Amino acid sequence: MLRITLPAFVLATMLAGCAQVAPQSDRSRPQLSYSEAQARYQQGLTNYRANRFEPALEDLTVALASGQLRSTDATDARKHIAFIHCSNGRELQCREQFQAILKANPEFNLPPGEANNTAWGPVWRSIKGATEEQRAVTQASSMLASPSQQKLAEGIRDYEAGRYKEAINALQAALKGGLPAHVDEIRAHKYSAFAYCLTKRVQQCRAEFKQIFTLNPAFELLPSEVGHPAWASVYRSVKAAATPRTAKAKK
């Protein structure tokens, strides 16, 4: 008569379960050597250039998941994975790849030809811009920041919290105190414009956008900002008025 005690049965079940789980764990992180990962990475780029996007996605994903790629190659793999996802309407996956790139290297930038691509350019510019905004607030909040920079950070925090009156006061104080860089001035004017438009003070909103285009005639709002109903029409009209001056200056 077959005798299997309960503990032995349980142990056998657990061991069988472990045997089933192990291959799944292995598949979650491909066991590739460095040369194998490089081969899959290069094959992915070859497929991408040949417009074979799904095979490219598979090759690049496997190479990246192996953990064997150099940091520059891993960034490049993520970039092409993002391009494929955005080109196929998978914005969430595209966004995740760009966010991972900037988390590893906040200084990373796409070249202009790629940054302006219609499929992924708006997603990239939105994420890059948001990352730079957050870095600016963090830096302006540091002990080494000037009083004006700290006021700028305070104004942005007030704006994000919906305290628009306090935001305007802090941002205007930052501008009056003198900000060290044009990008900081533009940021202060931009959030002032947003706050003014959101509180129905269109004339002041327009004046802030005009100040921005005086500092940078080529200025553009982020894709995530440009269509906001509170200021979109004001921004577009000021930008249109600034464009002829920009074109004339280039002649």
Image: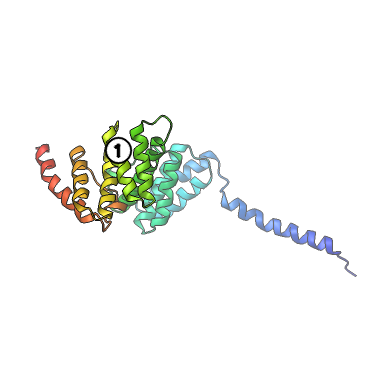
Element carrying mark 1: helix
**Which residue corresponds to the image point at 70% horizontal and 56% vertical from the top-left?**
18
Residue 182 image-quadrant placement: top left
In this rendering, does residue 166 appear at all?
A: yes
On the image, the x and y values in percent for residue 46 come to 39, 46
Horizontal side of residue 103 vs 86, given as left or right: right
Judge by depth and name the residue closer to the eye, 90 or 181. 181
* Viewer-side residue, 64 vs 178: 178
Residue 56 in view of the camera:
no
Above or below, 190 relative to 19: above
Q: Quadrant of the N terminus?
A: bottom right
In the picture shown, does residue 17 fall above or below 240?
below
Q: Is residue 29 left or right of residue 94?
A: right
> Could you classify mark 1 by the number of other residues whose Cα lies within 10 Å: few (under 14), some (14-19), or many (20 or more)?
some
Residue 106: % across, % down = 41, 39
- Along the line of sight, the residue nearer the viewer: 163 or 229: 163
Residue 248: name its quadrant.
top left
How is the rendered protein coloured? Answer: rainbow
Q: x%, y% of residue 7? A: 83, 61
Residue at 26% across, 50% down: 196
Q: Residue at x 27, y 46 (%)?
A: 192
Farthest top residue in view: 144
Q: Which residue is mark 1?
A: 173
Residue type at mark 1 is: Ala
Who is closer to the viewer here, 17 or 239?
A: 239
Query: In which quadrant will I find the C terminus?
Result: top left
